[in-house]
Image: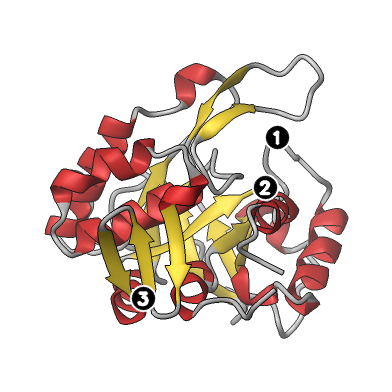
Amino acid sequence: MPAIAPSLRALLSHLIDYAGLYPPAALSLSDVAGKYERYQASEYGWMLNRVVLPLVKLAEAPVHDGWRIALLVDSEPGPLPPQVETLETKLPHRLSLPTYCEAPPDAIGGAFAKMRTGGLTPDTIPSTGAIADFLCYVSQHRVPFKATAGLHHPMRSMRALTYAADSPRSIMHGFLNVFIAAASAWYGEDELLEDILQEEDPRAFTFVGDVLHWRDYGLSTEQIETSRRDFAHSFGSCSFEEPVADLRELGLLP
């Protein structure tokens, strides 16, 4: 297989915050720590971003020098090890470190936004219209964001929502859809967002050299890099292996 196209590498670089402690995976802290370090050292480590931990688990975690941590808190946490780079909270304002706020975006002050894109039951999955509205608002107001929950797979598709044999099934949003839509929103292409979010044909997204194509629309590697750096930062996933496996199945990764 040829080398990964620069446009695809720009879209996927440091995209996934590993949140293996959380459902549906709900792994032990020791398992999460071991997996995070293995993923960092793997050939796909360039796609990995931070490991997501709650404050109550931080003291137990075997934090090493190479770790990068996103810490979930209810209030200002006080002194923290240098591996903690960002905070996540339901409060609507910035704390002592760069902060992602799971709050209405029009209520957030001086901080980043956090968008929930799924859950364990169909009713927790927002509509494409709701995601498009969020992306329009935060792009117009230049508020960077991350996504959380429900983005295990690259493409919008019908999926089981948990790993249980009797799991409910529903259409899940795809992380390629969401982050390509986000990049498009950053450049003012609001009228395209719902169609990009609803795309279910993986052949509609192509990565040829320095251009990402969705049908007749294109984004350059430079545009993608800028939107990722300044706007669409990452998404939290309880699995790193599933996104990688799906991208390989689509022929996008070797």
Mark 1 Cα within 10 Å, few/some/many (few <14, many 20+)?
Answer: some
The quarter of the rendered structure image containing the C terminus is: bottom right
User: What residue does disc 3 label?
Assistant: 229
Q: CA distance from mark 2 to mark 1?
A: 7 Å
On the image, the x and y values in percent for residue 51 come to: 65, 63
Q: Please, which residue is most extreme toward the bottom here? A: 65
Q: Is residue 45 left or right of residue 73?
A: right
Which of these two is toward me, 172 or 102? 172
SS at badge 2 = loop
On the image, the x and y values in percent for residue 101 come to: 36, 51
SS at badge 1 = loop
Q: Are marks 3 and 1 in contact (CB under 8 Å)?
A: no
Residue drawn at x 67%, y 50% as measured from the top left: 246
Q: Nearer the N terminus, badge 3 or badge 1?
A: 1
Q: Is residue 138 visible?
A: yes
Query: Residue 24's mark?
Result: 1
Where 129 sits versus 98, above or below? above
Query: Residue 238's mark?
Result: 2
Under mark 3, the amino acid is Arg
On the image, the x and y values in percent for residue 57 come to: 71, 55
Residue drawn at x 57%, y 61% as measured from the top left: 16
